[in-house]
Amino acid sequence: MKRIQLSGNIQKKIIFVTLSCILCMCLLVSGASYYIFHNYLLRSMIHSTETNLQLLSDTIDNSLNDVYRMVLFCQTNSDIASYIKNDTPPTSRIAVKTYDRITEEYNNNPHKIYIPRVAIITDDHFLQICDAAYSTTVNLAEEVPKLPYFDALLYNSNYDFSTGIISDPFRKNRVMIPIIRPITYQYSSIQGGYLFMEISTDLFTVPLSKYSHAEDSNIYLSMGEHNYVLQSGAFTATTTPYEVYGNLTDAALLSDTIIQQVADQEGKLHIIVTIPLNMTGCYISQSISYEELQFHQLLYVGILWGIIIGIFAIGILLMFLMNRMIHVPVAKLRSKIQQISDGDFSRDSDIEWNHELGDIGRGINSLSESVMLLMDKRMEDEKLKRDLEYQMLQSQINPHFVYNTLNSIKWMASIQGANGISEMATALARLLKNISKGTQILVPVRDELSFLEDYFTIQNYRYGGTITFEIKVDTASIYDCPIIKFTLQPLVENAIFHGIEPKGGAGRITIHAYHETSVFDGARDIRIDVTDNGVGISAEKAAQILSDNRDHSADFFKELGISNVHKRLQYEFGEKYGIKIESVEGQFTTMSIHIPGEQMTQDPMEQEAAKHV
């Protein structure tokens, strides 16, 4: 009953996990698809609006260029300059000639319908060309200078539409955009008169009358600080039409296009595409249709739901099919595992099918056979281990025999008064004892320095006492800090053989241990300097010593070269620790060991074992 219940729980888990995975996959796919489609749709509508606005702006810019050409003509024509200079009445020959020339240029302008009035004005007289509907008997020479925007437009560095759309001061129920520009004397920069021109708003509304856009898509016109919205074929002044919510200019096709996400007065978000016109501070903008965007989104969501339901149905069908295909083989595999747990390691060919579960069955059969082989090998290993322990016990006789022999030499040398031989035999006995005792890697600094003193005692007798040896430890706590066994000996050996011996005279070796703050993490580490006053080495040689695995010592410590010691320190304590070498050729060499400043802890059983070695 317990196995049946377990199987039922697994089946429920498989169904639950499968349905959860399918659901998560559907949600992930739908979310990613909706995000991608929404961005694609939004970009497509932005690009379409941008392209249409660009075509519209090109049409308006073409008209603006003709208007500007008319302005430039009035400012540079020699006949007009001559008229300004003479300031003659309109009936004079110069005035008539100038009028005819302006009329000719005006009639040749392809967009004269957008220029209802052109007037050349001096202090006392004026020449006016205008449509009959704009005709007036007002003395423009007197009335134009009274306009509130006269000085601002006249003395501006260039003409613009900063006044926005205003009422025509000389014709009721009409609006226009004024242009007032200075006209100078010929061959002089002195102003003698000025140009007064009216621009009709038809320049913008006529192209827009042929421009197709959705009902909820608004067209805006900005002129400096003035904003207008297109309503019923005419521009109506408006305050700030929207509040900027985000910048989407990165999605633009053209570099000068501005795309913004805005919120209207009701808080609804819109996308505004803005194209600059060929006039300073003048822009044409269009809001993307929210209804069109929402329609496409709802359509895609409906399609997406259909796909999700289809995927979910297919997933459920596959889940039940796979459950039936897996349930029987799993039951047989479980039965075989139970047999193995009961001690039956025989091979069962019934679980080796020709599919993935068959691979598991073959693996179980191989495992059961491997267990049998492993058990046999374990028994053989236990027998071999006992044999090796017996051999190791026998090998311990040799070091003890050497200790006893050295002690005998020591007492014989003492009786005969050969103190040097006695001291050297004692040092050698302690040296061999330190080499052979224990298997621990780390020892206290105290033990390492004691071992070093014994080693130096032997070497000092070899060199006839010409080498002095000094150990300085700044802080007593350093003695209890851990260091890798046989770390200092290769450095002292190198100082003797390669530093002092080539010098050919007396030498001095100093061991200085002290605390140092790490430059890496500020930790309180330990530094041990091994300094000799030998021949010194070059920087290249110092780098080679730390990287060269070969060792040139003839001593029995030759497997512990300086490069090996450096690597052992880094392996044990970390990359920031190890050996650094500082040397001046002909003066000194200092090999600095950097190790952590932690106190050493030793297992009580190891301490007790060390006492009996």
Image (cartoon, rainbow, N blue to C red):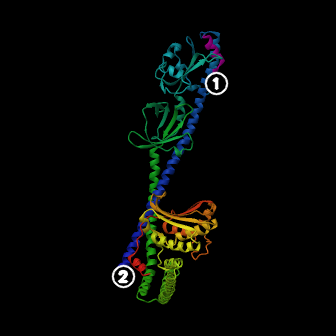
Q: Give SS at disc 2.
A: helix
Q: Which residue is mark 1?
A: 108
Say the numbered circle drawn on residue 3: 2
Q: Give SS at disc 1.
A: helix
Q: Amino acid at mark 1?
A: Asn
Number of numbered discs visible in the structure rendering: 2
Say the numbered circle drawn on residue 537: none
- Reply yes or no: does residue 77 show up in magenta: yes
Depth check, front residue: 259 or 308: 259
Give residue 186's position: percent from left, percent from top: 65, 16
First of labels 2, 1 by sequence position: 2
- Mark 1 crowdedness (10 Å alpha carbons): few <14, some 14-19, many ≥20: few
Give residue 532's position: percent from left, percent from top: 57, 64
Question: What segment is highlighted magenta in the picture?
Answer: 76-87
Q: Amino acid at mark 2?
A: Arg
Depth check, front residue: 37 or 448: 448
- Reply yes or no: does residue 106 show up in magenta: no
Check the image and report above or below for 295 versus 180.
below
Q: Which quadrant is home to the N terminus? A: bottom left
Q: Nearer the viewer, mark 2 or mark 1?
A: 2
Q: Which quadrant is home to the C terminus? A: bottom left
Q: Residue at x 47, y 57 (%)?
A: 32
